[in-house]
Image (tube, rainbow, N blue to C red):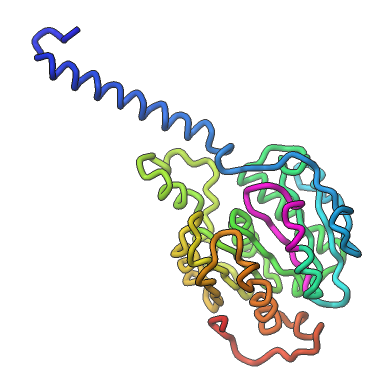
Amino acid sequence: MPSPGLPAWASVLLAFAAGLAILYVIVIAALFLLQRQILFRPAQDRPDAARVELPGLREVAVPTADGLQLLAWFLPPPGEGPVLLFLHGNGGHIGHRTERIRRFAAQGWGALLVEYRGYGGTPGTPSEAGLRLDAAAGLAALRGRGIPDGRIVLWGESLGSGLATWLAARERLGAVVLETPYTSVAAVAKRRYPFAPVEALMRDRFDSLVHMPAIRSPVLVLVGARDVVVPPDMGHAIHAAAPGAELWVAAEGGHTDLMQHGSIEVVAGFLRRRLPAAGQADGLPRPAGIATTVP
């Protein structure tokens, strides 16, 4: 029924505007309430290391500072080479990274793949604060096995790159590899939801860019030029923020397929140049000077 004193068309217009406003509030409320379900996409089944059929790979438990026991897979190095602390992306669990583990082993690298809280049957609920504790627990576990910091390589994949930058800004380690990194999760969300007040809504910001200048370890940034999940320019910004960092861009690469474009081999070359233990392990000398790009 038209409002008194207003023409019919104006009443219809007001009703339409009110409906849009209510719809906007509902959408914003849903984004706020469901933001962690949108950001964290865990698989709940428990991965089985035995199914990988990789000699030496075994399941271990990693305790966190807040009392959780994280599932992890540990692949000991065959000699004195690098040991990766691999921090995976927001989807699935460590069992979905079996091809990576095989490729790591083929390079002669050791690896610890820590499962996040709430992923892969591990107890707890994922959050930025919680995942930071999980990443720190992984580093403590490697140190507890007697692996020196100079042989430890932090490798952060997508969401895990935010954990790697945070940890690397606080601990000097052998090297840091950031695969398809973002400047912040809030910045990614802002591009995906430009209509929403993301800055006011985000609980878990994963602000990687602010940590980059404090990193003292050698850094390699891996970017897919055709990444439609994390804009490639964010990877370039991360590279520019770390003094002496190296950058590799896969011209045909996307967000999850950099291995198919040679990323493992690129990382191997980076570690031979920048990580003394890697060069010693395969007999290759470590060159003087610092390369700034990856050929």
At which x and y percent is residue 207? 52, 54
- Left or right of residue 154: residue 228: left
- Left or right of residue 22: residue 87: right
- Left or right of residue 65: residue 210: left
Foreground of the two, 227 or 109: 227
- Locate residue 250: give its quadrant: bottom right
Q: Residue at x 38, y 27 (%)?
A: 25
Range covered by the magenta-colored residues: 82-100
Q: Residue at x 77, y 58 (%)?
A: 98
Magenta-colored stretch includes residue 15: no
Quadrant that contains the N terminus: top left
At which x and y percent is residue 290? 59, 86
- Locate residue 152: give its quadrant: bottom right
All told, the count of numbered labels is: 0
Magenta-colored stretch includes residue 95: yes
- Locate residue 164: give its quadrant: bottom right
Quadrant that contains the C terminus: bottom right
